[in-house]
Amino acid sequence: MLTIKVDTALCSGHARCAAVAPDIYILDDDGYCIADGIKVPEEHETLAKRGARACPERAITIVEE
């Protein structure tokens, strides 16, 4: 299982992660990613990785457990 880690200091609210994977990357009302600590089910791992790669600020890290 994967866990999403979001560096909120780096997130600039581009919302590209949510554009790629809206069911995984949850945004606050201002468009900033609040998916920190979310566990990603195995069937969504590829999509979660794509969403992380879409972040221009590299604020998202995927941790394998």
Image (cartoon, rainbow, N blue to C red):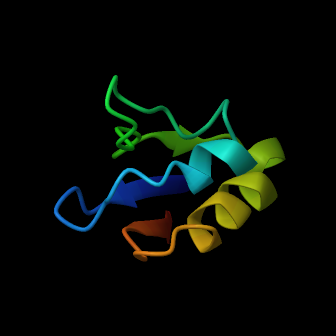
Q: What x and y, as percent, mark residue 57?
A: 40, 75
Report the side of 37 relative to 17 (left or right).
left
Regarding residue 4, the answer to whether it shows in the image is: yes
Whether residue 1 is visible: no
- Taking the image as shown, residue 21 lies to the left or right of residue 53, namely right
Residue 19 placement (x, y as % from top left): 68, 45
Residue at figure coordinates x 49%, y 32% from the top left: 26
Vertical placement of residue 56 versus 28, above or below = below
| Quarter assignment of residue 52 | bottom right
**Viewer-closest of 4 and 12:** 12
Q: How many marks are shown on the rendered structure? A: 0
Q: Residue furthest top?
A: 29
Residue in the image at 34% along x and 46% along y: 36
| Residue at the outermost left position | 9
Viewer-nearest residue: 31 or 60 = 31
* Quadrant housing residue 47: bottom right
Say left or right for 50 vs 4: right
Q: Quadrant of residue 30?
A: top left
Q: Is residue 48 above or below residue 52?
A: above
Residue 41 at what x, y percent from top left?
A: 68, 40
Residue occupying the point 22% across, 56% down: 8
